[in-house]
Image (cartoon, helix red, strand yellow):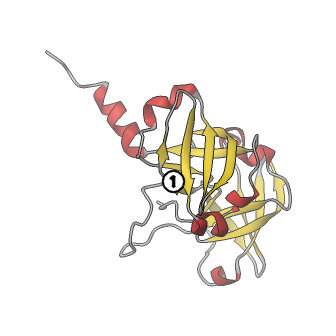
Amino acid sequence: MFTGIVQATSSTLRLSPSSIEIGLPDSWRDRLLVGGSVAVNGVCLTTREVGGRSFSADLSSETWSRTTFGSLRVGAGVNLELPLSLGNGLDGHWVLGHVDAMGHVRLLARERDAWSLVVSFPPSAHRYIVDKGAIAVDGISLTPFDVREDTLRCAVIPETYERTCLRERRPGDPVNLEYDILAKYVERMMRYVRVD
């Protein structure tokens, strides 16, 4: 489980439909272990190899087709997060690293001391996105507002903009979306509620 608080950024070194290799942040050399979990642009992966300068993970066909990895290029920046440890604060929201869909950046513009991000999403997801709720965009915990039929807006503070790869995104770029897990569970449970 993750929180959507990006801990480091790095770049893609190699990529194929079955595996990915990413530069290892210096501060992670003793923290990322073979078989451990890591969120890459919000996608939970299991590390296969950890070297002095990089780590690699296998990709399933489901991961390749459901995420932005299919459009990722070698050299592209990625957001990284290690899993939540017991005793750590929950600064963002519960993020599983299980991407629900791809969205697209519609707008990323400076507004006074912050940035405004507008992202499109599949219309079928509208029921999961709540004004002032939570969503993970490329692994970043954000608060949506101005939610419409197929777009949402988020305010991006300077700390988030500078510490993530969001600063590299341009209109039209695909992004990984993970909807709030609580909304998905509530919807599932409501299917079995009897109204007499």
Residue 191 drawn at (x, y percent): 31, 24
Mark 1: amino acid: Leu
Q: Is residue 32 left or right of residue 168?
A: left
* Above-or-below relation of 165 to 60: below
In the image, what residue occupies the spot 53% across and 26% down?
A: 149
Residue 74 drawn at (x, y percent): 86, 58
Answer whether residue 135 is visible to the viewer in this image.
yes
Q: Is residue 158 left or right of residue 64?
A: left
Which image quarter holds the C terminus? top left
Circle 1 crowding by C-alpha within 10 Å: few under 14, some 14–19, many from 20: many
In the image, what residue occupies the spot 77% across and 50% down?
A: 18
Residue highlighted by disc 1: 142
> Which quadrant would residue 110 be assigned to in this image?
bottom right
Q: Residue furthest top?
A: 196
Residue 136 drawn at (x, y percent): 54, 51
* Above-or-below relation of 57 to 173: below
Q: Is residue 57 left or right of residue 5?
A: right
Residue 100 drawn at (x, y percent): 56, 40
Q: Residue furthest front?
A: 112
Mark 1, secondary structure of its residue: strand
Q: How many marks?
A: 1
Answer whether residue 36 is visible to the viewer in this image.
no
